Image: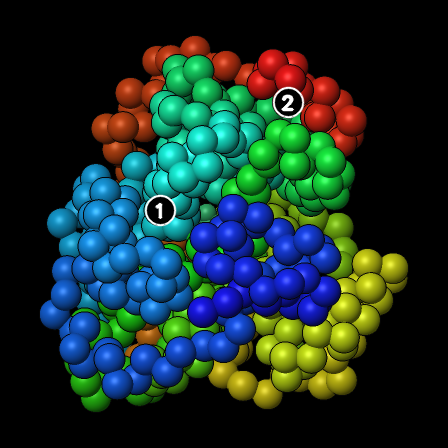
């Protein structure tokens, strides 16, 4: 299995190489050259514990990593999750389920990908003998999950940029109160898109990236997407058989990585009803799936900060498939998008993805309504998934974060204060912040200094 770039201008790479490179050299995103047909294997995987399922699935994508090594990696990655099932599927009523993806160390779904990625980095350091500099931008949860994937690991230093004042206070604490010497939490002025732009610029300096052994940790790494496909398969196999083929997965969405992972699983043979992209007021994807026009606008802060995004970095992968795997068309589309901030794909894309949006007021009302109706407390991101639950249709809403990460909004909405012991412990610790200008040169200088290069 080789990995090709959405822009067609890079030589095919192995899984190991694609993971190490993060972004393809031509600026595109890696994808498997073909998607395996897993429909014949799903039944045999039905009873595997989560980590074993992950090992079986990921083994399809990286023949150079043995089955035994995959099992070691996934057992270590998911062994520390607080729930024995790793991703429990909770039934709320006869046709509504919640897939709880928040039992990892930072209480959000990004732990699924980043615990594994941290271990793949560790494998890389052992393999190459070279120190690794991990750099990423975050709107909140990616940064903390990435940090906890790399925490205290020898041979790597991690630098995470985030928009100052725009991540939830507890999210910032998860990044800036680790006490680990290999972690730098770096607030920058502006929005998440500013932070992400700077990170992209730093990676754009090939020489710098090479001398620093720079690795990307944002949602573009192909290992992240594939690791996330696993919990869709996990949930799907737990559903009653008559529900599987028509169930809709509802995915609170920002960078489009999570829903893409499910959509890929569907293309590999997980027969389901489809997907709904649930956005907050930053509704670029909602507008896209309603009109076929992808048009960037200003990012507005919302109750669901991890979805405050107007330039979804994984969208290019979807676009590549939408263009029938035509890299040239993808290049042209991305160029158009970059130059005018707008892309018209010529009508609503056919397929199985719908979309919904939710403003802050409705998020609060929904947290309250879900609590009243089911006695179940959701976080503001997950709440977005509870809008427009399809009438009569079976739905699995992905719970992307624990309500304990966003206590202010949750208490105001439903009067219940969600608590979590690991978060409580963070409140007493000092913040260690490393503010930096939203400029590539300033970030590069800081990385050099801190890495002693
Ligand atoms: C990152 C995040 C999202 C958005 O996921 P994408 O893969 O970027 O679409 C939604 N909810 C929470 C809690 C998140 O941390």
The picture quadrant where one finds residue 421 is top left
| Nearer to me, 226 or 105 | 226
Q: Calculate the distance from the C-alpha at mark 2 to the C-alpha at mark 1.
A: 24 Å
- Mark 1 Cα within 10 Å, few/some/many (few <14, many 20+)? many
The residue that disc 1 covers is: 116
The residue that disc 2 covers is: 447
Q: Position of residue 187 (x, y in %)?
A: 62, 25
| Nearer to me, 294 or 24 | 24
Q: State left or right for residue 415 relative to residue 8.
A: left
> Which mark, by number, is residue 394?
none
Task: Please tell me which residue is depicted at 23% across the width and 43% down the height of the picture.
Answer: 76
Secondary element under disc 2, as helix, strand or loop, is helix
Task: Please tell me which residue is depicted at 33% across the width and 74% down the height of the picture.
Answer: 395
The picture quadrant where one finds residue 119 is top left
Q: Position of residue 317 (x, y in %)?
A: 60, 67
Looking at marks 2 and 1 on the same chain, the residue that comes earlier in the sequence is marked by: 1
């Amino acid at each position: 299995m080789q990995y090709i770039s959405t822009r067609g201008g890079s030589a095919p790479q192995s899984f190991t190489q694609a993971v190490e490179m993060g972004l393809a050299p031509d600026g595109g995103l890696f994808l498997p050259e073909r998607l395996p047909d897993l429909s014949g294997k799903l039944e045999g995987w039905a009873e595997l514990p989560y980590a074993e399922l992950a090992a079986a699935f990921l083994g399809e994508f990286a023949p150079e990593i043995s089955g035994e090594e995959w099992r070691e990696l996934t057992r270590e990655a998911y062994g520390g999750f607080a729930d024995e099932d790793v991703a429990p599927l909770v039934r709320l009523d006869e046709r509504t389920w919640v897939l709880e993806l928040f039992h990892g160390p930072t209480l959000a779904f990004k732990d699924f990908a980043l615990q594994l990625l941290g271990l793949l980095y560790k494998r890389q350091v052992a393999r190459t003998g070279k120190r690794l500099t991990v750099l990423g931008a975050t709107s909140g949860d990616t940064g903390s999950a990435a940090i906890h994937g790399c925490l205290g690991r020898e041979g790597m230093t991690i630098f995470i940029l985030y928009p100052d004042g725009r991540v939830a206070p507890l999210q910032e604490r998860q990044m800036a109160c680790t006490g680990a010497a290999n972690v730098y939490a770096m607030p920058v002025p502006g929005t998440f898109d500013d932070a992400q732009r700077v990170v992209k610029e730093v990676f754009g300096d090939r020489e710098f990236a090479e001398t620093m052994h720079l690795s990307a940790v944002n949602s573009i790494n192909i290992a992240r997407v594939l690791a996330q496909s696993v919990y869709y398969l996990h949930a799907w196999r737990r559903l009653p058989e008559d529900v599987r083929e028509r169930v809709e997965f509802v995915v609170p969405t920002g960078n489009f990585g999570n829903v893409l992972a499910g959509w890929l699983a569907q293309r590999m043979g997980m027969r389901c009803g489809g997907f709904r992209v649930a956005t907050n007021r930053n509704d670029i994807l909602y507008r896209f799936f309603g009109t076929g026009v992808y048009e960037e606008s200003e990012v507005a802060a919302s109750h669901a900060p991890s979805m405050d995004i107007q330039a979804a970095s994984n969208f290019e992968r979807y676009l590549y498939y939408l263009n029938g795997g035509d890299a040239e068309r993808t290049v042209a589309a991305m160029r158009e998008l970059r130059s005018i901030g707008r892309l018209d794909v010529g009508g609503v894309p056919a397929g199985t993805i719908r979309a919904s949006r939710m403003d802050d007021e409705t998020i609060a009302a929904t947290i309250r309504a879900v609590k009243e109706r089911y006695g179940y407390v959701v976080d503001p991101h997950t709440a977005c998934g509870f809008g427009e639950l399809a009438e009569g249709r079976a739905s699995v809403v992905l719970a992307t974060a624990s309500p304990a990460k966003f206590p202010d909004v949750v208490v105001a909405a439903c009067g219940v204060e969600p608590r979590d012991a690991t978060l409580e412990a963070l409140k007493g610790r000092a913040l260690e912040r490393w503010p930096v200008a939203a400029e590539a040169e300033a970030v590069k200088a800081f990385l050099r200094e801190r890495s002693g290069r």
